[in-house]
Image: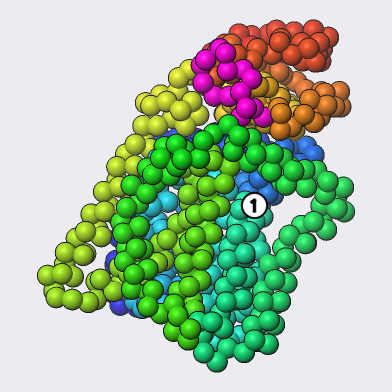
C-alpha cells in the first residue's frame, strides 16, 4: 500500500468521522435507540430477552448494546455510537475488499468511501445505532466470502459464506433475503459459468445452507434451554408478520414509494446512475457461458435488498441501509472503470462529479444532524423539553430502582439511567396509537393493539410480579402525540395507580407516580 493510498484512506476516514459529529451533540440519534438501550439494561439486571424486554427485532441488537454498556457503563450511548462508527468502517472495508477483488484498486476506495458517506445521508437518523447498520457487516462479509468461494471453487468457503449471511437475520429478519439471493444464484450458476459441475453446485448449495441455518439454530437451542423460545418466535415472527399486514392495510404503497423511497434515491443519485451504467455494461455477459456469474449475484442481491425494504409499505429511511452494501459495490465497480478509462479530461470530469455528489450530500446531512433532536423530532432543542423530568427521576430514585413509562418515549430511561419496570419499553402496543394530532384518529387501521391483543395480559402480569418504583405518564405533555391516550383511560392502569401509587410530581409535561 503506497503512501498516497494511505493518505487517501485517512482523508476518507476523517470525513466519515466528521459526518458523525452529531454523536457529540445528542445522546440519542433515534427513538429506537432508547428501546434497545432499555432492553440491554433489563438484560444486565438479569432479565431475559422477549420475556422481560419486548422488541420485534432479533436478539443481536440487544447484545451489541449490552456489550457496550458492560464495558463502558450502563446507558453509555457515546460508547454505543463509537461502536457503531467502528462497525460501519469495518463494513466499508469489507465492501472495499470485495470491489478490489472484482475490479481492482480504483474501485476499492470508491466502495469504501461510498458506504461511509451514504450511511450518513438522507436524514439525521441514518447514523443511529439501529439494527440495519449492524446487520450490514455479516451481510457484506457473506458476499465477500461467496466471491472467494466461487473464484477458488472452495466448498469450505461456501459454508463460511452461509455462516456470515446467517448472522444477518439475527440483527433484522429481512437480512435473510441475502441468503435467499445466494441460493437462487447457486441454482442458476451453471447457466452463466462454463465448467461448473452440477454435483459441485448441489454440494456447495447444501454447505451454504448448513452454514446459513447454523446461527439461528444455535440461538433457538439456547433460547429453548432458557425457556424463552416461544417468546422469541412470537415477537420475531408472529408479531412482525402482523405488523407488515397492518402496514399494507393502512398505507398505500405507491404514495409511500414517492414520499419515502424517492428521497433516498435522490440523496444517493450518484450511486443509482453508476449502478445503471454498470448494469448496461454487464448485461452482455448475462448469457449462457458468458462468465457473468458473480455480477448476476450482485444484481440479485441488490434486487432482494430493495424488495426487503419495501414490504409492509412503511419504508422508514433507515430501512434503506440494507440496500447500500450491494448498491455501493456495483456503483464502485462502474466508478473504478470511469476513473481508469477514456481521455484525461473525461476521467477528471468523472472524478469531479463523483467527489461533488458524494461530499456535498454528506456535508449537508451532517449539518442537519447537528441541529436535529431525535428524542422529540424537533430542531435546535427538545420540544417539549423532557430533561427536567429525567433529572428529577434520576435524583429521586436509586440506581437499582425501576420505572414504567406510559407513552412512546424511551429517552426517559436513557436520560434518567433507570431500568424499565415492565417488558414494554414503548406502550403504543397497548393503545390505538397512530402518530398525528387528529382526535378522530384513535382507531385507524395502523394501530398496534390489533396486532398484539396479547399485550395487556402481559403488562398486567408484569405489574403484579415486578417491582415498580415509579410510573411516568407522558401523555399530559403530548410526547410523540400520546396526549390522546391518558393513562387513566385504561382501567387496569387506573386501578393499579389508585391501589399502589400516589402522584408525586408534575414536571415537564409528565405525571410521576411513586408506587409501593
Please report the bounds of the magenta region as a residue range: 434-448
Instruction: Please say whether residue 199 is one of the residues in the magenta stretch.
Output: no
Residue at image x 71%, y 46%?
236
Residue at image x 74%, y 32%?
452
Using the rendered view, name the quadrant where residue 364 is placed: top left
Residue at image x 68%, y 81%?
202
Residue at image x 83%, y 46%?
230
- Looking at the image, residue 227 sits to the left or right of residue 395; the answer is right
Q: In this view, does 327 lie above or below 479?
A: below
- Looking at the image, residue 78 sits to the left or right of residue 106; the answer is right
Q: Name the residue under label 1.
A: 173
Near-viewer residue (416 or 496): 496
Instruction: Please say whether residue 444 is one of the residues in the magenta stretch.
Output: yes
Q: Is residue 20 above or below residue 252?
A: below
The percent coordinates of residue 399 (x first, y second) are 69, 29
Using the rendered view, name the quadrant where residue 501 is placed: top right
The answer, for residue 17, to whether it is visible in the render is no
| Residue at the farthest left position | 345
The percent coordinates of residue 317 (x first, y second) are 46, 42
| Residue at the farthest bottom position | 195
- Looking at the image, residue 397 sits to the left or right of residue 294; the answer is right
Count the labels in the image: 1
Amino acid at each position: 500500500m503506497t503512501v498516497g493510498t494511505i493518505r487517501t484512506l485517512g482523508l476518507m476516514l476523517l470525513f466519515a468521522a466528521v459526518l458523525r459529529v452529531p454523536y457529540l451533540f445528542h445522546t440519542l440519534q433515534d427513538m429506537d435507540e432508547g428501546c434497545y438501550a432499555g432492553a440491554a439494561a433489563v438484560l444486565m439486571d438479569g432479565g431475559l430477552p422477549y420475556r422481560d424486554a419486548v422488541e420485534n427485532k432479533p436478539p443481536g441488537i440487544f447484545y451489541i448494546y449490552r456489550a457496550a454498556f458492560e464495558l463502558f457503563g450502563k446507558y453509555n450511548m457515546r460508547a454505543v455510537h463509537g461502536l457503531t462508527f467502528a462497525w460501519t468502517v469495518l463494513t466499508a472495508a469489507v465492501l472495499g475488499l470485495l470491489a478490489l477483488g472484482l475490479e481492482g484498486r480504483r474501485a476499492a476506495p470508491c466502495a469504501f468511501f461510498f458506504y461511509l458517506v451514504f450511511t450518513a445521508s438522507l436524514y439525521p437518523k441514518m447514523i443511529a445505532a439501529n439494527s440495519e447498520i449492524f446487520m450490514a457487516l455479516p451481510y457484506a462479509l457473506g458476499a465477500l466470502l461467496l466471491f472467494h468461494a466461487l473464484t477458488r471453487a472452495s466448498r469450505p468457503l461456501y459454508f463460511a459464506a452461509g455462516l456470515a449471511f446467517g448472522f444477518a437475520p439475527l440483527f433484522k429478519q429481512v437480512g435473510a433475503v441475502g441468503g435467499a439471493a445466494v441460493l437462487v444464484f447457486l441454482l442458476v450458476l451453471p447457466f452463466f459459468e462454463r465448467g461448473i459441475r452440477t454435483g459441485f453446485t448441489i454440494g456447495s448449495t447444501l454447505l451454504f445452507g448448513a452454514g446459513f441455518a447454523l446461527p439461528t439454530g444455535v440461538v433457538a437451542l439456547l433460547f429453548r434451554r432458557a425457556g424463552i423460545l416461544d417468546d422469541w418466535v412470537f415477537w420475531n415472527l408472529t408479531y412482525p408478520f402482523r405488523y407488515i399486514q397492518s402496514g399494507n392495510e393502512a398505507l398505500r404503497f405507491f404514495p409511500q414509494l414517492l414520499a419515502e423511497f424517492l428521497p433516498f434515491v435522490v440523496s444517493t443519485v450518484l450511486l443509482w446512475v453508476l449502478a445503471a451504467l454498470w448494469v448496461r455494461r454487464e448485461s452482455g455477459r448475462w448469457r449462457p457461458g458468458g462468465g457473468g456469474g458473480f455480477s448476476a449475484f450482485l444484481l440479485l442481491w441488490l434486487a432482494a435488498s430493495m424488495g426487503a425494504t419495501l414490504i409492509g409499505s412503511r419504508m422508514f429511511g433507515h430501512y434503506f441501509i440494507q440496500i447500500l452494501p450491494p448498491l455501493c459495490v456495483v456503483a464502485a465497480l462502474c466508478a473504478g472503470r470511469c476513473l481508469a478509462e477514456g481521455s484525461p479530461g473525461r476521467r477528471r470530469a468523472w472524478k469531479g462529479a463523483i467527489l461533488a455528489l458524494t461530499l456535498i450530500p454528506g456535508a449537508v446531512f451532517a449539518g442537519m444532524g447537528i441541529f436535529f433532536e431525535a428524542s422529540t423530532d424537533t430542531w435546535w432543542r427538545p420540544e417539549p423539553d423532557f430533561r427536567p423530568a429525567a433529572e428529577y427521576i434520576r435524583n429521586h430514585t436509586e440506581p437499582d430502582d425501576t420505572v414504567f413509562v406510559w407513552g412512546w418515549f424511551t429517552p426517559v430511561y436513557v436520560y434518567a439511567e433507570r431500568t424499565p419496570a415492565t417488558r414494554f419499553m414503548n406502550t403504543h402496543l397497548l393503545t390505538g396509537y397512530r402518530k398525528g394530532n387528529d382526535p378522530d384518529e384513535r382507531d385507524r387501521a395502523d394501530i398496534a393493539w390489533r396486532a398484539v391483543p396479547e399485550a395487556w395480559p402481559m403488562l398486567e402480569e408484569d405489574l403484579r410480579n415486578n417491582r415498580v418504583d415509579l410510573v411516568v405518564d407522558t401523555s399530559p405533555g403530548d410526547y410523540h402525540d400520546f396526549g390522546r391516550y391518558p393513562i387513566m383511560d385504561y382501567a387496569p392502569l387506573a386501578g393499579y395507580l389508585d391501589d399502589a401509587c400516589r402522584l408525586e410530581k408534575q414536571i415537564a409535561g409528565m405525571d410521576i407516580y411513586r408506587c409501593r
